[in-house]
Image (tube, rainbow, N blue to C red):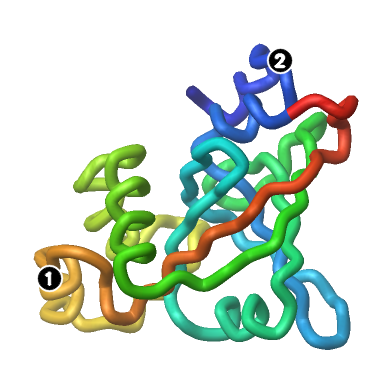
Amino acid sequence: MSVFSASTVRSPRERVVASRYVLLRTFRRDGVGVDTPIWFRVDGDVLVFRTKRGPKTRRLANRADVEFRLCDYRGRIVADGPVMYGRATILDGAAADAADRALRRRYGWFQWKIVPLIAIPGVTSVFSVLSWRDKIRLASTGGTWPEAALVRVELGPTSNDSGSQ
């Protein structure tokens, strides 16, 4: 379902689940928010996503509070979309592998393994600096990429929830 047609779904939580992308807001030490569009999967009150280890994972390690908004693949916010709040934990071991499998089930192998390695106009890829040899190695790797971090977010209330989730 397209992010722009998600308003036909009833609750704010259902709108987020139906979306392909959300805008993740993490916070620097000084409290300034940093926004990044992400692919994700929601299962109950848990959202998981994958990111490359770097500034975002350092921000999450320093401050686990995060916010989410509906967006498109370029991070353009959906005007009437809900804001969701949560607390993030960086996963490792079996929990990270399980989160990676869940994401791959939602997005499919090609989109999950190949699309992040392709240059898309208007989208900054964290993998754009890699050589083609490294990109092929990553795409053919089974399991979680060594450079990746899987993140679990315990979801809290949404901005336009009326107490139900």
Q: Residue 99 placed where, x, y %?
A: 38, 55
In front of the other: 91 or 144: 91
Question: Which numbered disc flags the more N-terminal residue, 2 or 1?
Answer: 2
Left or right for 98, reference 44 = left
Q: Quadrant of the C terminus?
A: top right
In the rendering, at what x and y percent does residue 46 appear?
Answer: 57, 47
Q: Amino acid at mark 1?
A: Ile
Marks 2/1: CA distance? 41 Å
Q: Residues within 10 Å of mark 1 (few under 14, many from 20)?
A: some
| Drawn side of residue 29 relative to residue 152, left or right | right
Q: Single out the mark in the foreground, 2 or 1.
A: 2
Relative depth, front residue between 6 and 67: 67
To which residue does mark 2 refer? 10
Say above or below: 71 vs 121.
above
- Left or right for 71, reference 165: left
Q: Residues within 10 Å of mark 2 (few under 14, many from 20)?
A: few
